[in-house]
Amino acid sequence: MRSHAKLRLNEDLARLARWLGFDRNPLRRGTDRVEGALRLVMIILAVLAVPAASVAAGRWADHYALHRAQVQRTVDHQVTAVLLRDAPAIGTPDPYASVQTAWVPARWQQPGQPPRTGEVLAVAGARKGSTVRTWIDPSGAVTDPPLDHRVIVGDVWMAVTATLLVSGVLLLAAAALARRMLDRRRMRAWEA
């Protein structure tokens, strides 16, 4: 049983060596050897370079998103806004929470600034005069809250996935182009 497994392994290794062009076949052309070397390079790139590029892209996306969130937290800040009208009883469902929200006119005041009015996001059914915490930018306008952990993780996954896909497609395209060039060379050799 043990010798059968060893024989099978030797056959598999011989087949792999033939496929890569590393056997000592005297009929193998130069283009066949180049093609075998290109196969080996493509395998190494697929196993090492593509994952490394994906990790680098993920790290860059993480660093960029964290920096952006930190800048938003230092520049923007939260204020308490007072609703000027009742919020509609039915609002827009939030895909990430079980509450419905609606845009409602409100008034808020940034420290050291005159009061401002505008639309803020409030829970559906909120009453006139109730308060809502909202984020504002340095000019006093309502803005989005700083990026949270879930958004940053999503950005990182998008960067990693896009890098994996683009790198894989580029690698396959390069292999196909190299194969086509080698086939053209072989055909010219056959014609000669």
Image (cartoon, rainbow, N blue to C red):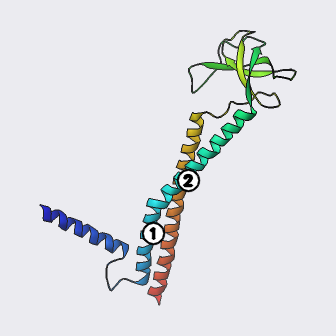
Image spot of residue 46 (x, y percent) = 46, 61
Q: Is residue 186 left or right of residue 14?
A: right
* Residue drawn 63% across the image and 41% down it: 66
Classed neighbour count for the residue bearing mark 2: other residues with Cα under 10 Å, few (<14), some (14–19), many (≥20):
some
Q: Secondary structure at mark 1?
A: helix
Mark closer to the observer (1, 2): 2
Quadrant of the image occupied by residue 28 = bottom left
Q: Residue furthest left?
A: 1
Q: Secondary structure at mark 2?
A: helix
Classed neighbour count for the residue bearing mark 1: other residues with Cα under 10 Å, few (<14), some (14–19), many (≥20):
few
Locate the N terminus by quadrant. bottom left
Quadrant of the image occupied by residue 14 = bottom left
**Amino acid beneath label 1:** Val
Figure check: 15 above or below 102: below
* Residue drawn 48% across the image and 77% down it: 182
**Amino acid beneath label 2:** Ala
* Residue at image mark 1: 41
N-terminal of the pair, mark 1 or mark 2, is 1
- In the image, which disc is placed on residue 56? 2
Q: Is residue 54 left or right of residue 8?
A: right
* Residue drawn 66% across the image and 42% down it: 67
